[in-house]
Amino acid sequence: MEEMTAENALFLLHGLYLPALKNESRVTKKVIEAVPAGKADYRPDPVSKTADELVRHIAAADVRFVDTVINGKFETGALLPAALKTPAEIAAWYEKAYAERLDALSKLTGEQLMKMVDFRGMFQRPAVAFLMLGVHHTIHHRGQLSAYLRSMGAKVPPIYGESYDSEQAKKTAQA
């Protein structure tokens, strides 16, 4: 197998990853917004994260993975402003922060995308690879959070096509 080149990295970013990241971030925002503020402490099991913990983790980690590519290093620490209290506030922050990062990401050079980045001493990958790591991470936790929604009395938004709830809402609107 050939080594990735700067041209390959640019193709991945512009041809594949940016459109996918934009779509996934819209879906992620919808799932975060679906969490009822008054039930954000819900957890299906004592060892599970609360809905609020998942919302915060998803929003911050999704932004952090893009920051990793932009900055050429994976950093830990607080990212989400502590003043954000509700899922709606976090969703609004996430939408703005993610859009800003996607804009910055679109301006990177192939060489920046190829910079080797260390992930917590566990492995090193070209920066561009962290985009799909981030997407997979978000999809995993977004799936957890979407499984909480109905139990919290919320509606599940469409994720990859209509959900039962979005289909029912459409039928009601047509009736």
Image: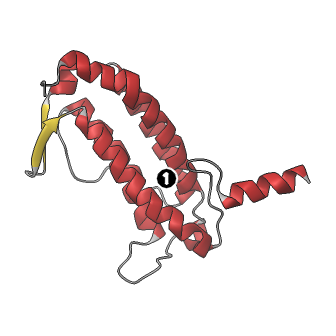
Amino acid under label 1?
A: Ile
Residue 64 lies in what quarter of the image? Answer: top left
Residue shown at 7% from the left, 51% from the top: 121
Which image quarter is the C terminus in? Answer: bottom right
Give left or right: position of 174 versus 133: right
Q: Is residue 78 visible?
A: yes
Q: Is residue 81 visible?
A: no
Residue 166: % across, % down: 70, 54
Which colour style is shown?
Answer: secondary structure
Residue shown at 52% from the left, 67% from the top: 147
Residue 104: % across, % down: 35, 25
Residue 74 lies in what quarter of the image? Answer: top left
Tell me the residue that label 1 is attached to. 90
Residue 21 lies in what quarter of the image? Answer: top left
Vertical order, 7 against 12 (above or below):
above
Q: Residue furthest right?
A: 175
Residue shown at 41% from the left, 52% from the top: 139
Q: Secondary structure at mark 1?
A: helix
